[in-house]
Image (tube, grey):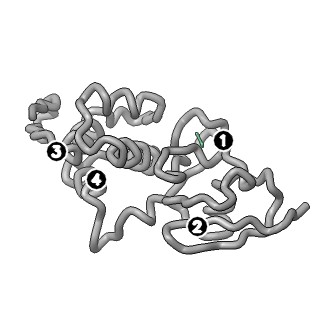
Amino acid sequence: MTDDPIRLTVNGTGHSIAAAADTPLLYILRNDLELNGPKYGCGLGECGACTVIVDGVAARSCVLPLSACAGRSITTLEGLGSRERPDPLQAAFVKHQAAQCGYCLNGMIMTAKALLLRNPHPSEQEIKQALRYNLCRCGTHVEILAAVMTAAGHHVARDHATGGAADATH
Ligand code: FES
């Protein structure tokens, strides 16, 4: 059943969405607005692949009903930057080649972005804390941490060729 349209803003553009109020935001983003940055992973709020930023806070869109988004401002991966003008955080992920299959990246980047919005220079421990519930089954954690550390303004020296560990200092 379709309820009264719900107004929300996505990546700076206003939308009026006519759908059942309990429809997960993730479905609206991917199926109605064709924003495929957020991914469907577990559908249970546990993996983080579907993360978006809602009013500045990271949120798992697979368990966020449309009704909870009324009047709110949502940013998806597409709203951060473009191929030509990437967000500095996205550029850092490219620099550190912080991906294997790439499925978790939306969640890693959006969760890290939300952290940087509230704390532009988090410590390594704060970054690890923020990302601790984002799952990566490929084991790319070292590169992901290096990317976020770089975006947070830390000097990160890492030898990718030899697989050396991240060496991050201020
Ligand atoms: Fe939303 Fe896993 S798909 S947390």
Relative to 124, residue 115 above or below: below
Query: Disc 1 residue type?
Result: Gly
Label 2 SS = strand
Q: Earlier in the sequence, mark 3 or mark 1?
A: 1
Relative to 38, residue 112 above or below: above
Q: Nearer the viewer, mark 4 or mark 1?
A: 4
Looking at the rendered image, the quarter that the N terminus falls into is: bottom right
- The residue carrying mark 4 is 89
Query: Disc 4 residue type?
Result: Leu
Q: Residues within 10 Å of mark 3 (few under 14, many from 20)?
A: some
Q: Earlier in the sequence, mark 4 or mark 2?
A: 2
Q: Is residue 56 visible?
A: yes
Per the model, the C-alpha gap separating discs 2 and 3 is 30 Å
Q: Residues within 10 Å of mark 2 (few under 14, many from 20)?
A: some
- The residue carrying mark 3 is 153
Label 4 SS = helix
Q: Earlier in the sequence, mark 2 or mark 3?
A: 2
- The residue carrying mark 2 is 9
Labels 4 and 2 touching (C-beta < 8 A) = no
Query: Disc 3 residue type?
Result: Gly
Point out which mark residue 43 bears. Answer: 1
Beta carbon of the mark 1 residue lies under 8 A of ligand 1: yes
Per the model, the C-alpha gap separating discs 4 and 2 is 23 Å
Q: Residues within 10 Å of mark 4 (few under 14, many from 20)?
A: many
Label 3 SS = loop
Q: Is residue 101 visible?
A: no
